[in-house]
Image (spheres, rainbow, N blue to C red):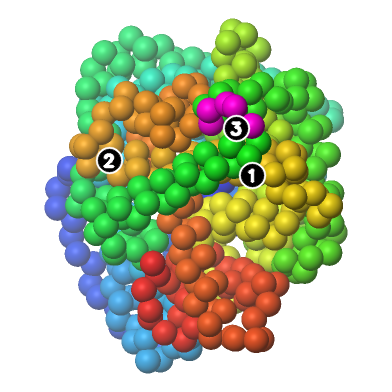
Amino acid sequence: MRAVLSLLTALILTSTFTASQSKPHKQASKPAPPANWDTLVEEFFSQNYFKFGPTAGTAAGFHQYDPLLEDYSRAAMEKEILSLKDFRSRFEDFSPEKLNEVQRGDRLVALGYINSTLLDLDTLQLWRKNPDRYSSNITNSVFVIMSRNFASPEARLRSVIAREKQMPTVFDAAHANLSNPPKIYTQVALMQLPGIISFFQKDVPEAFKNVHDEKLLKQFKASNDTVIHALENYEKWMKNDLLPRSNGDFRLGAGNYSKKLLYDEMVDIPLDKLLEIGMADLRRNQQRYKETAAMLDPSQTPQQILEQMGKDHPEPDKLLQSFRDVLGGLKAYIEEKKIITIPSEVMPIIEETPPFARALTFASMDTPGPFETKAKEAYFNVTLPEHDWTPEQVAEHMAGFNYGTIISTAVHEAYPGHYIQFLWEPQAPSKIRKLLGAATDVEGWAHYCEQMMLDEGYGRDPNLSLEQDKKFLKLRLGQLQDALLRNARFIVGIKMHTGEMTFDQGVNFFVTEGYQSRTNGERETRRGTSDPTYLYYTLGKLQILKLREDYKKKMGDKFTLQEFHDQFIKQGFPPIKVIRKAMLGDDSPVL
């Protein structure tokens, strides 16, 4: 992914590509290191990060970028590569001895982002492989403008029109750039496109229904119709031309996989060792699932109980309200038990996942950017069944929203997961910590919270023994089912991308080892083809658990859970290795 913008959500998508098969890059002259660290940071964001990613600028709350759209041409991408290499040299040349503790961590975070982006652009060349990047990214470029009222509807519509006028060139670039993509990438892009087209046909006009400026509406209709037509043509081209010649390989290979983990997460553990760690945690969670299931009903197998739990869910039209019903209780429990400080009483808005994100996203938290000053709404997105699904598809989808996993998902996305992270964001110590970060931190924290909240007694009836507390046992099974899902991501991500597992074997692993429905197993395996390091949920959770134990030893009798959580979360979103240094004062192993 391009970066952490507020949080890692399904709605903030990678938006840059390159063309590294052209002539060798001419190396820019090496500038002298700036005398001031803050100058270098500001130049990096203004001259690279937002310059080549104006959608990220809008999402972050810098609205001077609202009329601009990413340039997907090869020439623009060549410029970005040169810029990244220039800034890499400048960050490398800035001596850590000149920096304070936060800045030293920030320097590593910035270099990790730059190296990761160059890996994407220069080596992996995903601009050549993933047709969904073009269609989904332009959709997100409109969504970040229409989703929040940071300016008048008229002003925001003018920005939408400005971006839409530039979108036909995006598809020109797609035609020129895409060459032999993996079949699964083209299939996913085609799965997404009906929702994307519907988004421009229905959702975007609906968002600006209160605009009555006829001249402006006429301009919008023209630009919007042009985008719809371009998307329809893109869909036809993919079906008739690109799909038949989509025979590429989505796998990263072991070397690139290890580099991505190092650059994104500062994790340099060998992949075979990581697989041992992941399998060990999978087996622990499977054993705990069996033990919990036996307490719930010893006459049934865990699989039978899982099947029954999958049927215990709200009706699809009641799903959003079911999530709303649990948030207040979670928030009250956190405050009562002093689990973490909650900086605001405002709660997130629960709504249906936007159309362009539904093929790969079950639930997500979409929060405003860290520099947004006016529109501070946060949205908890939940993916509902599609209207044209069969009853069997609906049943399998809703099995993932049984009452146990509803609690687990609400903890992960809202309290005390991603939404609490967002509320703490203003206290992050630097601009880099607000805008760049690691998924092991963001998703690791939210996944850690799923287990931690139950460990701290949420949902437990103190008047009953554990064996008698059937409601709590179901909550624990829901949490463990989600943990097994993340365990399966851990194993499938590594094994698929290193050639040890096929796509179909990945689906079966999610079903048999991760205790997921086949529908969700297929969705998760599809996601793993383009989100290869989605082991970061479990990898981050395990790092946080180890940090907590190490911090507890350091603090002794002074340790409190609330103080640990507050100290952890106020660091922003850097790799956990950076947080360990800040909290423990050493470079001890993360696992």
Residue 56 position in % (x across, y down): 54, 51
Question: Left or right: where does residue 371 sit relative to residue 548?
Answer: right
Q: Is residue 428 above or below residue 276?
A: below
| Label of residue 495 in the image | 2
Type of amino acid under label 1: Arg
Q: Which residues are magenta?
A: 297-302
Q: Secondary structure at mark 1?
A: helix
Q: Secondary structure at mark 3?
A: loop
One can see residue 27 in this view:
yes
Q: Tally the marks.
A: 3
Residue that appears at 31% across and 39% down: 126
Residue 7 position in % (x across, y down): 58, 54
| Label of residue 476 in the image | 1
**Disc 1 vs disc 3: which is toward the camera?**
3
Instruction: Measure the alpha-carbon separation of dots 2 and 1.
Output: 28 Å
| Label of residue 168 in the image | none
Q: Quadrant of residue 527?
A: top left
Our reading of the magenta stretch's main secondary structure is: loop
